[in-house]
Image: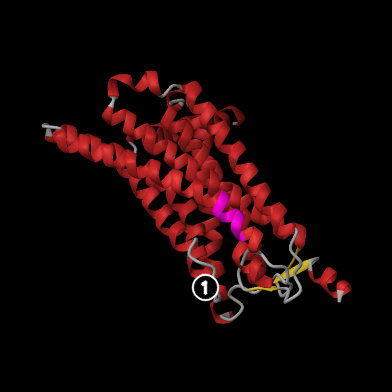
Amino acid sequence: MADTNHSLTTEFLLTGFSYHPDLKILLSALFSPTYLITMVGNLGLVALIFVERRLHTPMYIFLGNLALMDSCCSCAVTPKMLENFFSEDKRISLYECMAQFYFLCLAETADCFLLAAMAYDRYVAICSPLQYHTRISKALCIRMSTGTFIVSKLHSLIHVGLLLRLTFCRSNQIDHFFCDILPLYRLSCTDPFINELMIYIFSMPIQIFTIATVLISYLCILLTIFQMKSKEGRGKAFLTCASHFLSVSIFYICLLMYIRPFEEGDKDIPVAILYIVIPLLNPFIYSLRNKEVINLLKKVIRTSNVLKQTSSSIAN
């Protein structure tokens, strides 16, 4: 029995979407361009923020880190899912599985802190505009971003380490399209009580802290906006928060659905699909409603066209 258990821990089968083979072509046609657009959009936004000095401000530092984590989230899940659409071999090794979960957990934890930091940034910008540059400095943003990545890495390492203590002997089939923590618990023949306890000790406080930060920040923002006498001022304040509020709403609605009580079934799949869509939406949510980003993109495109024309004329 020990040998059997040991062999089962070396690899798993990702069976997500296996029950709907007729949808494979449609799903692959949908998710392939989604993945491409997600990577181009997020990494393009990161590059734009890095290159343009005018975007070296607190909000864009957080936004660049958020785009980077969205790219990480998409890279952790989508490539293996697309491979399984076209391959009969749906195996994934234990260490590949742990690596996939590590990067997904890292990205989602960092997203929670970054969205909370962005909410606080908007709170200071609207409620205390005269103190903004004093309270939200570039150095503070870099320290907050660094702290976010350190905490996110530690949080991910804790859960991966606890997963490695489990023995998987019930089955090697994960009813999901990526390695996630709840389906792995269901396959364990070791009691995952300690693992579940650590979720409540480490993960739940992170969720409570970040959600409370967002809610308190937006409550103060709303109170400040309603006290404004100028309609123009109210409009500008709403526009300042609209993109972030939309992004944060989508993220936390999905997250709250996802961290429901541990239960059997394949409800993970439709909820987890949203974690592929969210990284796609964020660059458009923040860019299309931001005139500064749009103008800089136009400038970059014009510059690249001029360079192409210059290089082609030199070649001729």
187 and 272: which one is in front? 187
Tell me if I can see residue 231 in this picture. yes
Residue projecting furthest to the right = 3
x, y percentage for residue 145? 53, 33
Q: Which of the 4 image quarters holds residue 298?
A: top left
Q: Is residue 200 magenta?
A: yes
Q: Is residue 270 magenta?
A: no
Residue drawn at point x = 63 percent, y = 64 percent: 178
Crowdedness of circle 1 by 10 Å Cα count: few (<14), some, many (20+)? few
Quadrant for the C terminus, please: top right
Residue drawn at point x = 54 percent, y = 68 percent: 262
Q: Judge whether 158 appears above or below 230 on screen.
A: below
**Colour scheme:** secondary structure
Q: Main secondary structure of the magenta part?
A: helix
Tell me if I can see residue 41 in this picture. no
83 and 267: which one is in front? 267
Magenta span of residues: 196-201
Residue drawn at point x = 48 percent, y = 45 percent: 112
Q: Judge whether 119 appears above or below 158 on screen.
A: above
x, y percentage for residue 155? 62, 46
Three-letter code for the amino acid on which mark 1 is drawn: Leu
Residue drawn at point x = 18 percent, y = 32 percent: 233
x, y percentage for residue 231? 12, 36
Residue 149 is left or right of residue 290, and the answer is: right
Q: Secondary structure at mark 1?
A: helix
x, y percentage for residue 282? 43, 48
Q: Which of the 4 image quarters holds residue 117?
A: top left
Residue occupied by mark 1: 26
Q: Which of the 4 image quarters holds residue 194?
A: bottom right
